[in-house]
Image (cartoon, helix red, strand yellow):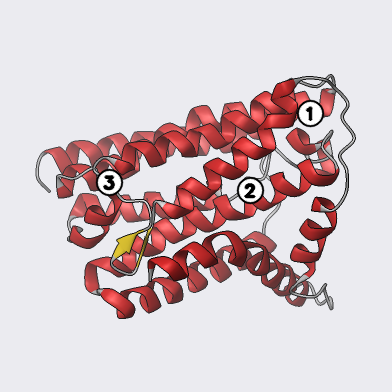
């Protein structure tokens, strides 16, 4: 199963985005592009040279750092019974590379002199200051209840309780937000700030960033699917159940996205703060043993 995971983690996400684009088109009564269109776009971009608006090393390294972070996130997750990268405390490492992804976007965007790029970086940073702690609190509830800092061990040993049920709902929410679906795609906001942090990127570097964003989305939803599926199954059956939960969650998120408009930054942060308050309450409930 780990070998299958190593294959699907980098190569399945763009195909899923193509399917998502087709679903959105159907909901909006359009024909839509081919399900392979996202792959076509990425391959085309990767074959092109990038136009560099600055000599900053941060600008050039950010896409590679973002892609490496996204891949690490995906490879730390269990596929069936075990993860490809599995070690004690890998939950801490997951949170680290998860945060590093956003940091790469921010540093890359701030390294170029462009107001749209800076606006996107500021939005990404603001959202990160709210939703990264929310993710840490949510995942901390699972760690507290299972007594482990291993993603695989947590996924296999979660048992129902009041705090865990609440943590599942919070994890689903923060997964949606961090997957960059509308109404939370505020940092990019193509119609407002021309893709924000990606504005000045082109060619190969833009292709790497778009690929990295798709892999990050895959990793977040697969994490949620793992926590749902692995407590009740093992081995090949667990992998199949993970995949089914993942696809169902992905399609539901795409459908919900198609029915919403983008939030303002202040609206999103208010929602995030409410989530943090709920998360802290659930953490206290978990600490009390419930």
Q: Which of 187 and 275 is in front in this view?
A: 187
> In the rendered image, which quarter is residue 33 located in?
bottom right
N-term mark: 1 or 2: 1
Q: Mark 1 points at which residue?
A: 117
Instruction: Tell me: 86 left or right of 222.
Output: left
Between the residue at mark 2 and the residue at mark 3, the CA separation in whole angstroms equals: 24 Å
> In the rendered image, which quarter is residue 215 located in?
bottom right
Q: Which of 26 and 96 is in front in this view?
A: 96
Q: Mark 2 points at which residue?
A: 212
Q: What residue is shown at x 28% (from left), y 75% (from top)?
A: 235
68 versus 133 height, above or below: below
Q: What residue is shown at x 63% (from left), y 55% (from top)?
A: 214
Q: Is mark 3 on a helix, strand or loop?
A: loop
Q: Is disc 2 surrounded by few (<14), some (14 to 19) or many (20+) residues within 10 Å?
A: many
27 versus 226 height, above or below: below
Residue 202 visible to the viewer: yes
Q: Which of 38 and 263 is in front in this view?
A: 38
Q: In which quarter of the image is the N terminus?
A: bottom left
Between the residue at mark 3 and the residue at mark 1, the CA separation in whole angstroms equals: 37 Å
Q: What residue is shown at x 65% (from left), y 27% (from top)?
A: 106
Q: Is disc 1 surrounded by few (<14), some (14 to 19) or many (20+) residues within 10 Å?
A: many
Q: Name the residue under label 3.
A: 87
N-term mark: 3 or 1: 3
What number is the disc on residue 134? none
Q: What element carries label 2?
A: helix
Between the residue at mark 1 and the residue at mark 2, the CA separation in whole angstroms equals: 18 Å
Q: What element carries label 1?
A: helix
In the picture as drawn, the residue positioned furthest to the left comes out as 289
N-term mark: 2 or 3: 3
């Amino acid at each position: 199963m780990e070998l299958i995971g190593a294959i699907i983690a980098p190569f399945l996400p763009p195909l899923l985005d193509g399917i998502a684009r087709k679903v959105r088109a159907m909901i909006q009564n359009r024909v839509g592009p081919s399900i392979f269109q996202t792959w076509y776009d990425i391959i085309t971009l990767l074959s092109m040279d990038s136009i560099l608006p600055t000599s900053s090393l941060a600008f050039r390294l950010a896409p590679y750092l973002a892609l490496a972070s996204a891949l690490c996130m995906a490879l730390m997750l269990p596929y069936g019974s075990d993860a490809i990268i599995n070690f004690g405390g890998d939950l801490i490492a997951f949170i680290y590379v998860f945060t590093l992804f956003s940091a790469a976007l921010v540093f890359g965007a701030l390294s170029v002199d462009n107001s749209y790029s800076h606006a996107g970086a500021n939005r990404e940073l603001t959202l990160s200051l709210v939703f990264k702690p929310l993710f840490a609190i949510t995942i901390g509830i699972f760690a507290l209840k299972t007594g482990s800092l291993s993603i695989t061990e947590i996924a296999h040993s979660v048992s129902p309780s009041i705090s865990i049920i609440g943590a599942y709902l919070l994890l689903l929410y923060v997964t949606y937000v961090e997957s960059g679906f509308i109404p939370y795609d505020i940092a990019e906001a193509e119609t407002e700030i021309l893709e924000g942090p990606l504005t000045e990127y082109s060619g190969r570097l833009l292709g790497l960033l778009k690929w990295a964003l798709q892999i990050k989305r895959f990793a977040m939803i697969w994490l949620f699917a793992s926590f749902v599926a692995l407590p009740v199954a093992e081995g090949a059956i667990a992998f199949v159940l993970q995949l089914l939960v993942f696809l169902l969650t992905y399609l539901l998120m795409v459908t919900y996205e198609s029915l919403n408009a983008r939030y303002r930054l202040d609206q999103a942060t208010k929602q995030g703060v409410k989530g943090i308050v709920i998360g802290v309450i659930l953490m206290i409930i978990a600490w009390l043993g419930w």
